[in-house]
Image: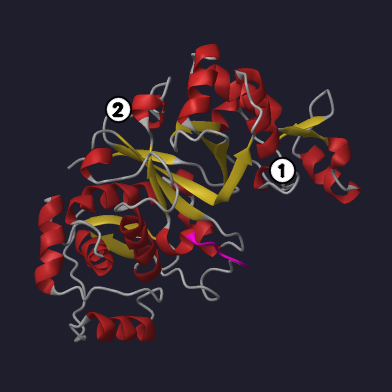
Amino acid sequence: MTQILTSRRIPSDTESAGFTRQAVERGWADGLPCIPPTEALVSQYIEAVGRPPDEVIAVLPPSRSPCTVEKIAINAAMTAAAPAAMPLLCAAIEALSEPDFALGGVNATTAPVSPALIVNGPMRHALDIPFGPSCLGGADSAAPAIGRALRLIMRNVAGQRPGQTTESVFGQPARVVSLVAAEWEEESPWLPLAARRGIDGDAVTVFPMMGSMNVVDTIADSAESIVQMLGRSAGYLGANGFLAATELSQILIAINPVWAEIVGRRYKDAEVLQELLWEEACLPISVYPASYRAGIEALERVGADGRVHLLRSPHDVLVMVCGGMGSLHSTVLHGFTSSLAVTRPVVA
């Protein structure tokens, strides 16, 4: 949808340190240094995406404010994200606004949930999105600036403010710079994540991430043992998907390339792998404190064998390949109650 909406101009310091102080005082920033978003600079970002500055990309809760191309450009400029990342940011904002993602709940919850952006397609290389060693945090790349731009949009446009519109008890580092990573498609034995979700080429999957959980195994020597370790590690008692009130949730498992090769030789179909991981991610109802059991039973989540699966369906197990060749580790990202991953194409 398109309507005439321009951002309000406020006189500000054009020097970075001075602008950063002003931005923090006004609640525009997260405490990290900011680049002054001058009109000349912001115009570069708008030109890079080739869309009208007043085009409304989405309406974001809790503020219900229209998020225009210009507002995305302003926040991206503040982080020094590359202008070429604008199409990715616009697609990510569109994904956030989809009903399946349930952004209102994500923004208001007591949980530490934050959108993670998983990138597929050739733009991984053009935008310098990491998919090798330290790809989920620590790699020298453009990812932190892009993720921080997304988080500033959630602050400045959506209106997510700690202790005010969000009751997140602890938060997490991803609530500052998000998590932006790509899939190492060239090392994957399966189709890329986005392609398996119906979108070929350049795409972004926005996943409601509660945090990252490392899974380490120095002995794994077979596909079966790797799958068991990953699935059983994901299904721990305090995981969000096991809450008595949870009707839906997802997990995203990032498998390192070495393990992916081993697993892919045994399980060539990614759907088979998802089903096996789903089967392993469960607990017997007997391990729950007695007061929890009634709620889980009321949701009809206890199987005939007395087990409770972390997730409703094998399709709720998302799998991607990334990380270094050091092996030994994989990462599980647990999703948020009532929020689902959304995949959108990225059109330059």
Q: Main secondary structure of the magenta part?
A: loop
In this rendering, the answer to whether 51 lies above or below 251 is below
Asked if marks 2 and 1 touch (Cβ < 8 Å), the reply is no
Which of disc 1 and disc 2 is earlier in sequence? Answer: 2
Where residue 186 appears, as percent x and y from the top left, is 34, 26
Residue 306: x, y in percent? 84, 28
Q: Residue at x 46, y 29 (%)?
A: 257
Residue 200, label in figure: 2
Residue 51 colored magenta? no
**To which quarter of the image does residue 13 belong?**
bottom left
Disc 1 crowd, CA 10 A, few/some/many (<14, 14-19, 20+): many
- Kindly state the secondary structure of the residue where label 2 is placed: loop
In reply to whether residue 171 is colored magenta, the answer given is yes
Q: Residues within 10 Å of mark 2 (few under 14, many from 20)?
A: some
Does residue 29 sit above or below 260 in this rendering? below
Q: Is residue 224 above or below residue 245?
A: above
> Is residue 117 placed above or below 5 in the rendered structure?
above
What distance separates the C-alpha of mark 2 from that of mark 1?
A: 33 Å
Q: Which span of residues is magenta-colored?
A: 169-173
| Amino acid type, residue under disc 1 in the picture | Phe
Q: Which circle marks residue 242 in the picture?
A: 1
